[in-house]
Image (cartoon, rainbow, N blue to C red):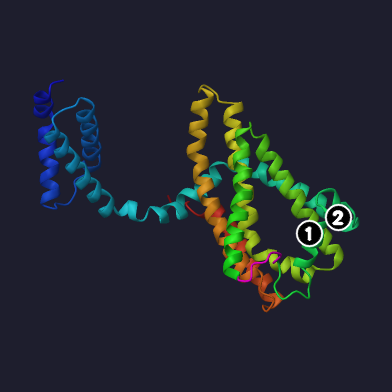
Amino acid sequence: MKQELFEVQHAPLWEKLESELAEKKPRDTQFPQNFRTVCHHLALAKHRRYSPQLVDRLNALVIDAHHRFYQKNRRFRYQWLDFIVFEFPLAIRRNARFVLLALALFTLPLLVMGIGCYNNNELIYSVAPAEQVQSFESMYDPDAEKIGRERDSETDLAMFGFYIKNNIGVSFRTFAGGILFGVGSIFFLVFNGLSIGSVAGHLTQMGYTSTFYPFVVGHGAFELTAIVFSGAAGMKLGYALIAPGTLSRLDALRVAGRETVIIVYGSTLMLIIAAFLEAFWSSSAALPVAVKYSVGGCLWALVTIYFLFAGRAR
């Protein structure tokens, strides 16, 4: 199409949008659609090598409209709140079957290994080397000044950074393993369940219950739940590859990816909260055990209620 005809066809829309932006009129309901249309016009103008003057005009119009749209868009401004209140919990409930399966794959090995290590103090060495077992024992020694700290980091802030890196690494591996037709996610869920259960059973058998459980009860509500969610998201990806239905496997993966990315973002937020609690709350030896159990119980109840009921009003 020649440039002259292109301008004749679309100039009224450009002028209308320019007028609206110049006079700062309240946006009409067509503003988002007009904005997208002008973006398309700009792309066409560049592709067809129309005059620099026309490209500059459309480029300026797109920039102004973009600024107006995102700076003034109330929905965009509060998008993070919409995500927390609605999108994340709704995504979890829409994928309840994957969440429940992930929960079983994580919890059952945890319980079996926990009971096994409690009754057999040698069993933990089947999943962890002796040096690591010794490290766990020193971390939760009731005589330790800081509970749960094994590295050279001297400050809670340094541990906060370490926990973020460690927790997100575990969660990401559990999620990304799903691309292997779900097998990777299943493996990491079972492996994490076995590892955590073995430590819990071993330390319980040693009598370290006054340090270990008060340490994990608070941040565990966010951390353990986020690991299960990451595994559920990974298995959803794997299921899309195994049973794509009428779609191609690539398209099925794209569709599943839109849903799982919400779960991954939400899980990452939960892991950051968990890392904060682990560094500044759980590790404190000064807080009474009863307080830690009480707060931990409230956090578990809060997380449960949130995922069962949040977003129902939409």
Q: Is residue 61 left or right of residue 313?
A: left
Residue segment shown in magenta? 149-155
Asked if 267 appears above or below 213 in the picture, the reply is above
Q: Residue at x 64, y 49 (%)?
A: 170
* Mark positioned earlier in the residue sequence (1 or 2): 2
Mark 2 residue type: Cys
Q: Label for residue 245?
A: none
* Element on which disc 2 rests: helix
Question: In the rendered image, which residue does mark 1 sit on?
Answer: 200
Q: Quadrant of residue 100?
A: top right
Q: Position of residue 64 (x, y in %)?
A: 19, 47
Amino acid at the residue labelled 1: Ala
Residue at image x 74%, y 66%?
Answer: 213
Mark 1, Cα crowd under 10 Å, few <14 / some 14-19 / many 20+, is many
Asked if the residues shown at circle 1 and circle 2 are in contact, with their CB atoms under 8 angstroms apart, the answer is yes
Question: Horizontal and vertical percent for residue 275?
Answer: 59, 61
Q: Nearer the viewer, residue 144 or 205?
A: 144
Residue 117 is labelled as: 2
Classify the position of the N terminus by image quarter.
top left
The residue positioned 77% from the left and 49% from the top of the image is 194
**Marks 1 and 2, how far apart at CA:** 8 Å
Q: Main secondary structure of the magenta part?
A: loop
Displayed quadrant of residue 302:
bottom right
Q: Quadrant of residue 38?
A: top left
Query: Could you tell me residue 186's position as x and y percent?
Result: 69, 39
Left or right: 248 with respect to 183? left
